[in-house]
Image (cartoon, helix red, strand yellow):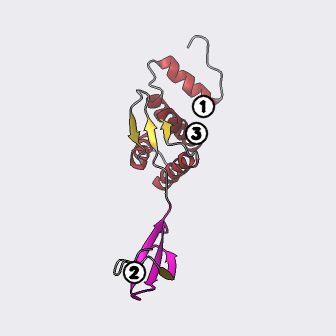
């Protein structure tokens, strides 16, 4: 690590501990040449996730946007925001672990629906209705039938 005072690239770690938010490592270093101390922070390098939308446009993945969509789906439902934050974190980790730089928005929608289905059925149907863009009552009935474990009716 290059010393910010004298520019020498040789320093030793004097102290190392997690930062307050536990997302970084704080290191106190001492320059081997000028003996001055300085602080560095070490963070995990993540691959930026790009979302490929249905119309093939691309935009950066946004935790906030995902959280907001879950919040809307769970509006007036007995679902705690901590649970929604856990889902967002889990989905983001799944996407990071896939090691793909570009993720189709369809995949993110599937992950959201998997989580909502077991969390709250009403929120699941709300999200699914927007996600699948239900055009009529028969497609809406099909989605509800799937939740109830029934086979969709022939008549719609």
150 over 27 or under it: above or below: above
Q: What's the residue at 49%, 58% (across, down)?
A: 45
Find residue 38 and name its label. 2
SS for callout 2? strand
Badge 2: how crowded within 10 Å, few (<14), some, or many (20+)?
Answer: some
User: Whole-percent x and y of residue 13?
Assistant: 50, 81
User: Whole-percent x and y of residue 35?
Assistant: 41, 89
First-in-chain label (3 vs 1): 3
Looking at this view, name the residue that lies furthest to the bottom. Answer: 35
Q: Is residue 122 visible?
A: no
Residues tagged 3 and 2 counted as in contact (Cβ below 8 A):
no
Q: CA distance from mark 3 to mark 1?
A: 11 Å
Choose between 97 and 127: the one closer to the eye.
97
SS for callout 3? helix
First-in-chain label (3 vs 2): 2
Choose between 4 and 147: the one closer to the eye.
4
Residue corresponding to mark 3: 114
Residue corresponding to mark 1: 147
In the rendered structure, which segment of residues is drawn in magenta? 15-44
User: Whole-percent x and y of residue 111?
Assistant: 55, 40
Badge 3: how crowded within 10 Å, few (<14), some, or many (20+)?
Answer: few
Choose between 39 and 109: the one closer to the eye.
39
Magenta segment's dominant SS is strand
Q: Is residue 155 magenta?
A: no
Badge 1: how crowded within 10 Å, few (<14), some, or many (20+)?
Answer: some
Pair 3/1: label in front = 3
Q: What's the residue at 51%, 20% (across, down)?
A: 139
């Amino acid at each position: 690590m290059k010393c910010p005072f004298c520019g020498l690239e040789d320093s030793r770690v004097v102290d190392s501990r997690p930062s307050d938010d536990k997302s970084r490592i704080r290191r106190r270093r001492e320059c081997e040449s000028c003996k001055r101390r300085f602080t560095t922070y070490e963070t995990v390098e993540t691959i930026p996730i790009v979302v490929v939308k249905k119309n093939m446009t691309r935009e950066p993945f946004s935790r906030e946007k995902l959280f907001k969509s879950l919040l809307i789906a769970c509006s007036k439902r007995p679902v705690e925001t901590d649970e929604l934050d856990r889902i967002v974190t889990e989905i983001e980790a799944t996407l990071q672990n896939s090691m793909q730089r570009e993720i189709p928005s369809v995949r993110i929608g599937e992950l959201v629906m998997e989580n909502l289905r077991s969390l709250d059925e009403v929120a699941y149907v709300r999200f699914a209705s927007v996600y699948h863009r239900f055009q009529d009552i028969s497609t809406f009935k099909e989605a509800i039938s799937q939740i109830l474990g029934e086979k969709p009716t022939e008549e719609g």
